[in-house]
Each structure stands twice: as C-alpha cells, then as structure tokens.
Image (cartoon, rainbow, N blue to C red):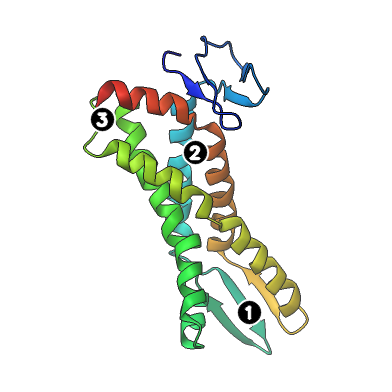
Amino acid sequence: MNSPIACHDCDLLQNIPVLPEKAVARCVRCGAVLYRHKPDSINRTLAWTFTGLVFYILANSYPFLAMKSGGFVQETKLVTGIIQLYKQGIPEVAALVMLTCVIFPLVDMVGTLYVLLPLRLKRRSPKGAIRVFRLIEMVRPWGMVEIFMLGILVSWAKLAKMATIIPGLAFYSFVVLMLAIAAAASSLNSHLIWEKLDRRT
C-alpha cells in the first residue's frame, strides 16, 4: 500500500504497509480502523455485482406479488406500488421510493461494472472513472432495497387476513438482489480501487 490514509476519526495521515489476509490496520493515535484487507476484492465484487444485475432485471420484469381473494387474482409488479403512490397524490413519496429502490441500486451496479471491469482486464480506466466511482460511493448509502423489502413484509402480514398473498418470481429475485448488493458492498475495497484509478488515469 503506497498512498497514505487519513484517519476518519482524528485526521492523522499515516502510511500503511502491505497487509496479510484478513489483517486490519488501525490508527496509531486513536485506534480507529483505517484499512481492512479484503482478499480478491475486484473479482468478488464483480461476481456479486453481475449477480445483482441479473436479478435486478428479473425483479423488474416479472410479477412481484399476487393477491387472491374470492377467486379473483390481482398481480402487481415492482413499479406498481410507485405508480399507485403517484396516483394517490403523494408524488414525493413515489419519487423517493423510485430513487432509493430502483434508480440508485441500478446506478450503483452499472457504475461498479464500468469502473471495475477495465481494472480486472488490466486496461486503461474509462473516461470519467474517478467521477463515476465517487458517484457510486455517494449513491450507495441511499440504495435502500432492504427497507423496501421490510415494508413489503409488513404489508404482507397485514393483507394476509384479507386475502391470500402469493409471492412471484420478482419477489424471490428481489431477495437475491438485496443479498447480492450487500455482498458486493462488503467485498469492495475502496482504497485499493482509488489507488488503481490514480495509477491508470
């Protein structure tokens, strides 16, 4: 590890040596975690991101839930709830759900592929890679697919007394998407990516 790291807690600038697997570097002043070694970070992050993108497409293409009551079955897709929120006169909430559960996760995954694939293939970083990676780190905390899933489960529990709820392919795809996004974020070594971008741009 060549470039120094500023501690997020006390701002002390310090160099970190090459770390063995699963090692953690801590600030010499305050003991905060500066860097955590993540083996095979790029390959693992790419694998999880590709997985997430596939299930993102499935989650947005197939029925999410079906509600069966009295012989009548009504299917809903992921965007149906967003459209209904808009039609009910709360466009701000509809826009918030659209951004945090649909747009931001897609930006995160596509941006990650845009930045990491050239690094994996040992090619020159694409135009604007640094800006894209900065955007990814800004957007990622706002991708709240797990909050959306929690809301779905709460609604499911309430509606179960009135009708039979049948999960569709999109529901299971969304669960896998949620896990894949979390795994990709956990596998990503941001400091390593910044170092490689600095060398290749």
Image location of residue 143, percent across then percent down: 51, 54
Q: Which mark is residue 67?
A: 1
Judged left or right of residue 155, residue 19 is left
- Alpha carbon distance from label 2 to label 3: 21 Å
Q: How many marks?
A: 3
111 vs 197: above or below:
below
Can you identify the residue that label 2 sits on?
A: 48
Q: Mark 1 or 2, which is nearer the eye?
A: 2
Residue at image point 68% right, 90% down = 70
Judged left or right of residue 83, residue 26 is right
Q: Of marks 1 and 3, which one's residue comes earlier in the chain?
A: 1
Q: Is residue 78 visible?
A: no
Residue at image point 46% right, 14% down = 1
* Residue type marked 1: Met
Judged left or right of residue 199, residue 179 is right
Label 1 environment density (alpha carbons within 10 Å; few <14, some 14–19, many ≥20) = some
Judged left or right of residue 198, residue 154 is right
Label 3 environment density (alpha carbons within 10 Å; few <14, some 14–19, many ≥20) = many
- Alpha carbon distance from label 1 to label 2: 32 Å
Can you identify the residue that label 3 sits on?
A: 125
Q: Furthest-right residue in view?
A: 161
